[in-house]
């Protein structure tokens, strides 16, 4: 993320500016920054036992318990992010490494040494040719939705099966799929004077990651393709994205599947009011990640409204729905996940934001069964 990516995240959320430290070393500017956050989350689950990736049911939502409490990360993990940038031979050059870690574990003595290197890449380009990126970074598809989600500063759906040892889910699986982290070669054209941009990326093909079952597919030789066209102005941004990958069956009797997804969304700011809407649809998009439900057809809907009552306080409400069209074997009976979150985000100063959220996550099965998780999250986040 570096100072500039941190600033971009915060700008998307209408929050304070990042405070990364810049160090000049010859022709290089080295930037070091990061994130630390913690939230007291308490959840209560009730209803039927629903199979698959039912985020509102007891198995995932409350980590197998009726009620549970965790003090851990929200949607963002802790992070230490370092970058170096310079201009050389007519090109702007940058390299970045982002190392991420979780707050909560199930042990008071075990080593919390698992790190997640989500980003490790370099870029080069200029105003004439655009920018080329090589390395590991977030995907293009779905990135605008999660960066615009107000719960990026908080917790959103405080799913206990993921918060301990990782993060909460925001609206992942209940509004949009995770953008993913991929080894990639991507290219961004220079933006036109009217604010139109185009991004395309070849992503290293991935296996499916069904979470609650073993892997059923493996990647083929062709890379995953992601692309996006966007338009932005002073008060708005709109985007149209797509992605595709061929998966080869690793399970006898199960055929190959091609993931195809399309996304359209927009955000708009009018004075103190912020609005965002995003829709995703496709086959094998998964609930949480690529093809985690096999060849199931899925639709994701996400809407949000925020209002700044002052320079320090922002209030917001967001709703997301992820819905399976068919009761396939990969869906394991799950019809939908939905999450409604109401939040308050208070800038204590230019470094720290204090957060309070309440919400409910509901899961439905194709056979009519229902379950829900009520959750509260209180805590804060610092960008440095």
Image: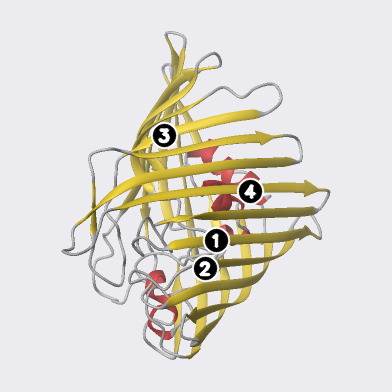
Dot 2 falls on a residue whose secondary structure is strand
Q: CA distance from mark 4 to mark 2?
A: 18 Å
Nearer the viewer's eye, disc 3 or disc 2? Answer: 2
State the residue position of label 4.
Answer: 265
Could you tell me if residue 266 is visible in this image?
yes
Cβ atoms under marks 4 and 2 closer than 8 Å: no
Q: What colour-coding does the image apply?
A: secondary structure
Query: Which circle's residue, 4 or 3, is located before the other in the chain?
Result: 3
Please report whichever mark, 1 or 2, sits nearer to the chain's N-terminal start. 1
Q: Looking at the image, do the residues carrying marks 1 and 4 touch, with CB atoms under 8 Å apart?
A: no
Locate residue 259, reporting x and y percent.
Answer: 38, 51
Q: Which mark is residue 323?
A: 2
Residues at discs 1 and 3 in contact (Cβ within 8 Å): no
Vertical comparison of 23 with 360: above or below? above
Q: Secondary structure at mark 3?
A: strand
Measure how far apart labels 4 and 3 are at the Cα level. 19 Å
Mark 4 or 2: in front is 2
> How far across and down, in percent of the image, does residue 43 sit?
51, 83
User: In terms of sequence position, does the residue under pointer 1 or pointer 3 come before the other?
Assistant: 3
- Residue with the mark numbered 1: 300
The alpha-carbon separation of the residues under discs 1 and 4 comes to: 11 Å
The quadrant where residue 316 appears: bottom right
Circle 4 crowding by C-alpha within 10 Å: few under 14, some 14–19, many from 20: many
Circles 1 and 2: CB atoms closer than 8 Å: yes
């Amino acid at each position: 993320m570096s100072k500039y990516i941190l600033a971009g995240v915060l700008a998307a959320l209408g929050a304070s500016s990042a405070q990364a430290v810049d160090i000049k070393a010859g022709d290089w500017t080295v930037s070091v920054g990061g994130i630390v956050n913690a939230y007291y989350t308490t959840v209560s689950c009730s209803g039927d036992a629903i199979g698959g990736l039912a985020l509102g049911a007891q198995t995932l939502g409350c980590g197998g318990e009726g009620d549970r409490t965790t003090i851990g990360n929200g949607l963002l993990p802790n992070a230490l992010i370092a970058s170096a940038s310079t201009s050389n031979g007519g090109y702007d050059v940058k390299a970045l490494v982002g190392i991420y870690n979780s707050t909560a574990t199930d042990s008071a003595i075990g080593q919390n040494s698992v790190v997640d290197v989500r980003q490790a890449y370099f870029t080069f380009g200029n105003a004439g040719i655009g920018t080329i990126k090589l390395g590991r970074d977030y995907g293009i598809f779905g990135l605008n939705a999660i960066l615009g989600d107000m719960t990026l500063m908080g917790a959103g759906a405080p799913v206990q099966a993921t918060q301990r040892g990782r993060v909460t889910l925001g609206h992942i699986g209940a509004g949009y799929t995770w953008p993913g982290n991929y080894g990639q070669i991507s290219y961004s054209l220079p933006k036109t004077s009217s604010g139109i941009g185009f991004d395309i990326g070849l992503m290293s093909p991935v296996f499916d990651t069904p979470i609650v079952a073993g892997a059923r597919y493996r990647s083929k030789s062709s890379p995953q393709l992601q692309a996006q066209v966007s338009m932005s102005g002073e008060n708005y941004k709109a985007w149209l994205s797509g992605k595709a990958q061929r998966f080869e069956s690793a399970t006898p009797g199960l055929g190959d599947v091609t993931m195809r997804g399309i996304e359209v969304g927009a955000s708009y700011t009018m004075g103190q009011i912020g609005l965002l809407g995003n829709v995703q649809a496709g086959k094998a998009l998964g609930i949480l990640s690529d093809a985690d439900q096999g060849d199931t057809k899925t639709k994701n809907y996400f809407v949000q409204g925020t209002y700044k009552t002052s320079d320090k306080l922002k209030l917001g409400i967001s709703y997301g729905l992820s819905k399976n069209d068919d009761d396939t074997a990969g869906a394991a009976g799950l019809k939908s996940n939905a999450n409604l979150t109401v939040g308050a985000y208070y800038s204590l100063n230019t470094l720290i934001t204090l957060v309070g959220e309440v919400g409910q996550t509901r899961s439905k099965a194709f056979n009519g069964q229902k379950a829900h998780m009520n959750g509260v999250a209180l805590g804060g986040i610092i960008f440095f």
